Amino acid sequence: MSGTLRPRLRLVAAVTAAAALVLTGCSSSGSSGSTDAQTGFIIGKGGAPDVAAAGHRQDAPDISGTTLEGAKVSLSDYRGKVVVLNLWGSWCGACRAEATEVQRIWDRYRDQGVQFLGINTRDNDARNAIRFEQEKGVTFPSLYDPDGTQILKFPKGSLNPKFIPTTIVIDREGRLAARSMKALGSDKLEAMLAPVLAEQPK
């Protein structure tokens, strides 16, 4: 196999994996309510979020890129804050349903050491995503990630995203603390965020 063909095959594989992830989108995960002793994850029951005990959290990848508004952003820019990642697409009905609820919690906590960051995916035209933000009144920044490159940086076996929408809470040390793979109301998002925010900074 030629040296030029291998990189192309790797790129095709990466794009295919990203497409497979988001094509299962607008769906929620099954959950058993069990605890995985190896990972320390508590798997949410009945749609409850999956959480990782503080001693078992994996580092979040340093996702980075350009926002829909054209600014350069890296997750590491927010180290020391609790970060709420929201994966969404303008094409996703469940994302449309939760957008104003997510914005409501952003408005409530933005001055309390919390940063919201969206990852917009599978919108081949950024104008569709920008129109979505305008219609829903979304003001927190979102990385533009149409091919899922940033999503693929999340390590397997962690609280990685598998569906769209997915919301992930990252603690002050940059570790994956909680995940919900369904559309969230403001009360459920706040309940997922509050315990991580209440943790004492080290």
Image (cartoon, rainbow, N blue to C red):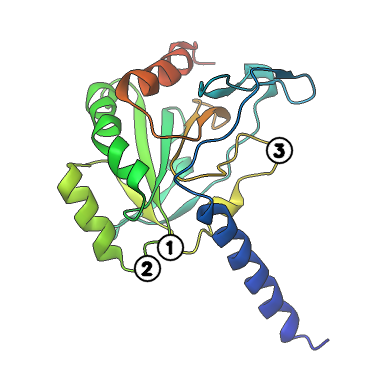
Bin the neighbour count of mark 2 within 10 Å (Cα to Cα): few under 14, some 14-19, many 20 and up.
few
Q: Is residue 138 visible?
A: yes
Reply above or below: 122 against 29: below
Residue 12: x and y, percent?
A: 64, 73
Residue 173: x and y, percent?
A: 54, 27
Residue drawn at x 30%, y 64% is 126
Question: Mark 2: which secondary structure?
Answer: loop
Question: Mark 3: which secondary structure?
Answer: loop
Q: Nearer the viewer, residue 3 or 35?
A: 35
Bin the neighbour count of mark 3 within 10 Å (Cα to Cα): few under 14, some 14-19, many 20 and up.
few
Q: Earlier in the sequence, mark 1 or mark 2?
A: 2
Q: Amino acid at mark 2?
A: Asn
Q: Quadrant of the N terminus?
A: bottom right
Left or right, 30 with reference to 68: right
**Cβ–Cβ below 8 Å for labels 1 and 2?**
yes
Q: Nearer the viewer, residue 70 or 178?
A: 178
Question: Which mark is on residue 124?
Answer: 2
The residue beneath circle 3 is 157
Q: Earlier in the sequence, mark 3 or mark 2?
A: 2
Q: Amino acid at mark 1?
A: Pro
Q: Residue furthest right?
A: 1
Residue drawn at x 52%, y 44% is 163
The residue beneath circle 1 is 146
Question: Which mark is on residue 111?
Answer: none
Residue 64: x and y, percent?
A: 47, 53
Q: CA distance from mark 1 to mark 2?
A: 6 Å
Q: Nearer the viewer, residue 165 or 65?
A: 165
